[in-house]
Image: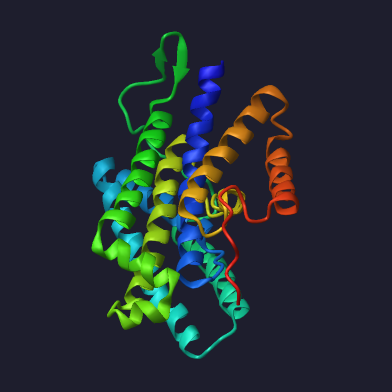
Amino acid sequence: MIIQVLIGGLMLGGIYALIALGYSLIYKASGLLTFVQGEFFMLGAFLGLTFYEFWKIPFIVSFFIVTLIMFFFGFMIEKIIITPMLEKKAKKIYIVLATIGLSITLRNVAMLIWGSTNLYFPPIFNVGILDIHGYKVAPEALLIIVISLFTMSALHFFMNRTNLGISMKAAAQNELAAKALGINVSFTRGITWGLSAALSSIGGILFAPMFSASVTMGVFPGLMGFASAIVGGYGNMYGAMIGGLLMGFIQTFSGAFISSLFKNFIGFVILILVLFIKPSGILNEEAVED
């Protein structure tokens, strides 16, 4: 049983980490809170279902198409909504409210397009439950673990080994100095929002085959991703990864060894304790001052 619980923890933790990365990247880049990550997650699931189930495009191709679409969608949201508000010197709380309004809008648009009932993915693999040395494991769970860990590794490489990634980090650390060095801060901020949307959508298209797609499916993972980002150190990319994996393991082990009725409760108790004891999170990320 312990192996299955570990796999479950890695699976959930990988999903939460992807969503938490979206929150942290945006906060680090602009000091803004956003509450639309759950809807990016939901749109990734529905778009994946549309391409894979309805249009019969192979899953791996659908996966890359959805990721690309959501990247450009996030980029355009920043250019159409966020940048104009920043240029008008809108208070950050108003921008937060704008993201809440956007999340409600996206949820209702999704309901108009795909309906309000749960939609189910067809199997991704032609095999059933795998038997690995006596342990029953769903192949989709292994897929989630592999892709989420690969995505986090690729993001690390992008941010630390590419010119664009380094420019994004520089712009996030000191916008004025970055502009003086010729870095297009507006463009890097748009890329950050694009990456944020893409990361959450990857979580959605991986999560839905294990469960289902619905207009409200992003609400709880969005909350858990937010909690994971705080636990790890809000705004710290690596803290988001650690926090996501930690919250996934806490939730899975609580459900397996305590009670499934309390697994969500225990996760949020951990969040409250972190806020009281160590609000800077595991990696000591300090809050951005307004």
Determine the image quadrant of residue 265. top right
Residue 219: percent from the left, percent from the top?
59, 53
Q: Quadrant of the N terminus?
A: top right
Q: Is residue 250 above or below residue 51?
A: above
Q: In this view, does 226 lie above or below 73?
A: above
Determine the image quadrant of residue 114. bottom left
Q: Residue at x 41, y 39 (%)?
A: 121
Residue 232: percent from the left, percent from the top?
57, 49
- Viewer-proximal residue, 250 or 168? 168
Residue 212: percent from the left, percent from the top?
49, 41
Q: Which residue is drawn at 33% across and 33% down?
A: 124
Q: In this view, does 289 lie above or below 218?
A: below
Outermost residue, bottom direction?
A: 88
- Viewer-proximal residue, 157 or 6? 157
Outermost residue, top direction?
A: 134
Q: Which residue is drawn at 35% across and 50% down?
A: 156
Q: Decide if residue 121 is in sight here.
A: yes
Q: Residue at x 41, y 77 (%)?
A: 175
Q: In which quarter of the image is the C terminus?
A: bottom right
Q: Decide if residue 186 is in sight here.
A: no
Residue 136: percent from the left, percent from the top?
46, 16
Total number of numbered discs in the rendering: 0
Q: How is the image coloured?
A: rainbow
